[in-house]
Image: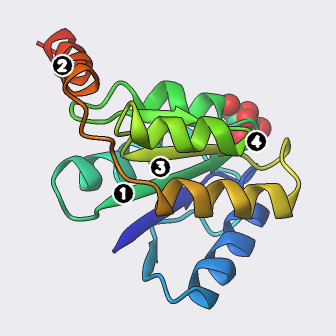
Amino acid sequence: MIAIASDHGGYALKEILKEHLAGRGIPVEDLGCGGESVDYPVYAEKLCRAVAAGQYERGILVCGTGIGMSIAANKIHGIRAALCGDCFSAEMSRQHNDANVLCLGGRVLGTELAKKIVDTYLDTGFSGAEHHARRIAMIKELEN
Ligand code: RB5
């Protein structure tokens, strides 16, 4: 199960992505917002704490640019959030960084590109290579 959340700037893309994921048979839980004007750190925290607690395998956060969500998400212990605007970055975020949250800019991306980025992100696994695992362990050390 994956979680998705947005602020008002990401709401329209979030709705499109939910439909896309449903079409692929991927279970997704929407943690808000409902389109009203909200503060994105609230939704970044809600989703990231749930992902960090193991409630969801991974999360997707959408705001206007994806920047605010990614800054907030990366403050949460255990979260490696990747702001992606292309499929190569989405692939690498999984293979090299084992990113557990994907951030997207709803006012930046076209819908077809956004869907492709999400598919790439969800369909790619961590490489498991020792040097990447070591670097992720080093990132975790930074949290202490
Ligand atoms: C909201 O207007 C906007 O600032 C937000 O969606 C996001 O782009 C922040 O980084």
Give me the residue at 59% from left, 57% from top: 120
Residue 39 appears anywhere in the view: no
Element type at mark 1: strand
CB-based contact (under 8 Å), mark 3 and mark 1: no
Q: Nearer the viewer, mark 4 or mark 1?
A: 1
Mark 3 element type: helix
Residue bearing the label numbered 2: 134
* Position in image of residue 103 (x %, y %): 57, 43
- Report crowding for label 1: few under 14, some 14 to 19, many 20 or more residues within 10 A (C-alpha): many
Q: Quadrant of residue 118?
A: bottom right
Q: List the residue tagged with mark 4.
A: 64
Q: Residues within 10 Å of mark 4 (few under 14, many from 20)?
A: many
C-alpha span from label 2 to label 1: 21 Å
Q: Is residue 52 above or below residue 89?
A: below
Examine the image and state in which quarter residue 28 appears.
bottom left
- Dot 3 or dot 4, earlier in sequence: 3
Give whichever of 59, 123 is nearer the camera: 123
Identify which residue is drawn at 84% across, 64% down: 112
* Of pointers 2 and 1, the one earlier in the residue sequence: 1
Specify whether 46 is left or right of 62: left
**Which amino acid type is marked by label 2?**
Arg
Q: Nearer the viewer, mark 3 or mark 1?
A: 1
Amino acid bearing label 4: Gly
Please state which amino acid type lies under the numbered disc 1. Answer: Arg
Label 2 near label 3: C-beta < 8 Å?
no
Label 3 vs label 2, nearer the camera: 2
Residue picked out by circle 1: 58
Q: CA distance from mark 3 to mark 4?
A: 13 Å
Identity, as a three-letter code, of the amino acid under mark 3:
Tyr
Label 2 crowding class (10 Å Cα cut-off): few <14, some 14-19, many 20+? Answer: few
